[in-house]
Amino acid sequence: MRNWENNVRRVCPYVPGEQPKDKDIIKLNTNENPYPPAKGVMRVLKDYNADNLRLYPDPSSEELIKALADRYGVKSSQIFVGVGSDDVISMAFMTFFNSDKSVIFPDITYSFYDVWAEVYNIPYKTKPLDENFRINENDYICENGGIIFPNPNAPTGVYESLDKIEKIIKANPDVIVMIDEAYIDFGGESCIPLLKKYDNLLVIQTFSKSRSMAGARIGFAVGNERLIKYLNDVKFSVNSYTMNSLTQKIGVEAVKDESYFKDTTNRIIRTRERAKKKLLELGFIFPDSKSNFIFVSHPNKSASEIFCELKNRKIFVRYWDKPRINNYLRITIGTDKEMDTLFEALEDILSD
């Protein structure tokens, strides 16, 4: 080992879902939206003057923040935007999780949380989900340095009620509680209304799923004005120009088209509910999903074998070889046509 390597910060990086180069596939492994962005987004992309790229973007993302504030009924000073919700959560870890006490989150959850904790040298502990993949709120009523979990959870798709979440927030007034709502638009109620009661709550959402803009990288947080100021102080100490001007403009258009947003999310919800019935007919078991994916297991064939067989048929789903979930697959909800092709392939695989 070279001497300089003694000072390298070493972490086990997050591993994203596979992004195959082949376009002749059915891609149900990264929870992308199967439908295109709103028409206003497409119009901006078509008419955008590329000469603007020589100029720095608005560092405050004022137009996008105002559109979000109007949409969610809060002040502009209560909105923070970043380059995808991953960027927002990373900034929030850096800003708010700074005590010597352990941050806590579920043992089965978004696998970036422990990576950020290790990158920023934040102590952390995980709390086990129960046998139904649900949070036990009493596990979070303890001394800690902060709390984060998704709702609905990833990769399980399980949604926890606002009553349960409020109990956790109320019991932890001295730390920041972050609720990662990447999938909230596909079922359940957002925690945003709880901001009127709790100044230690930060709600994080993304354009990647329900607004069909994973490639644009837009995420945002909603919180009280002091939390947002602290986040901006850190952001402007790291990089003042995190979001480019084109992304800001298409983000505004995506927020403005509420009708299209509701139409596409409802289409995904309808397909998800149909998929649940078909998967049950095929013998799969799964927790009830309120997201744009279903977390499935089959009693007669291993998840790893199904994963490989589907991949051979150019159908990509997500598999983790991890404790407690190594016999589960996460299947993103695609179009009805894509899902029908998946069901035919599963019937063939299970009949072998």
Image: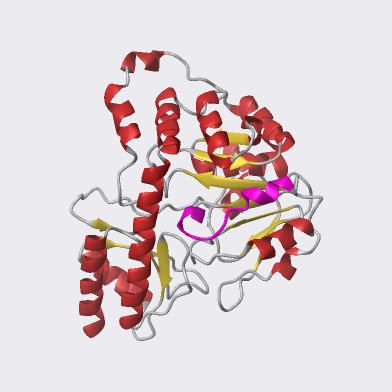
Above or below residue 40? Residue 34 is below
Above or below residue 107? Residue 43 is above
**As drawn, is 213 to the left or to the right of 348?**
right
Residue at image coords 76%, 52%: 145
Residue at image coords 79%, 63%: 142
Q: Position of residue 64 (x, y in %)?
A: 50, 30
Can residue 237 be seen here? The reply is yes
Question: Across the whole image, how many numbered discs are drawn on residues?
Answer: 0
Residue at image coords 56%, 66%: 108
Reply yes or no: does residue 192 show up in magenta. yes
Considering the image in quadrants, where does the C terminus appear?
Answer: bottom left
Residue at image coords 30%, 58%: 334
Of residues 7 and 313, the one nearer the viewer is 313
Q: Position of residue 56 (x, y in %)?
A: 47, 16
Where are the magenta residues, as a range? 183-196
Q: Quadrant of residue 94?
A: top right
Q: Position of residue 4 (x, y in %)?
A: 59, 36
Question: What color scheme is it?
Answer: secondary structure
Residue furthest out toward the left: 24
Residue furthest out toward the front: 259
Of residues 319 and 54, the one nearer the viewer is 54
**As drawn, is 317 to the left or to the right of 140?**
left
Q: Position of residue 224 (x, y in %)?
A: 71, 39
Of residues 98 and 137, the one nearer the viewer is 137
Above or below residue 220? Residue 274 is below
Above or below residue 290? Residue 256 is above
Can residue 8 be seen here? The reply is no
Considering the image in quadrants, where does the N terminus appear?
Answer: top right
Reply yes or no: does residue 334 show up in magenta. no
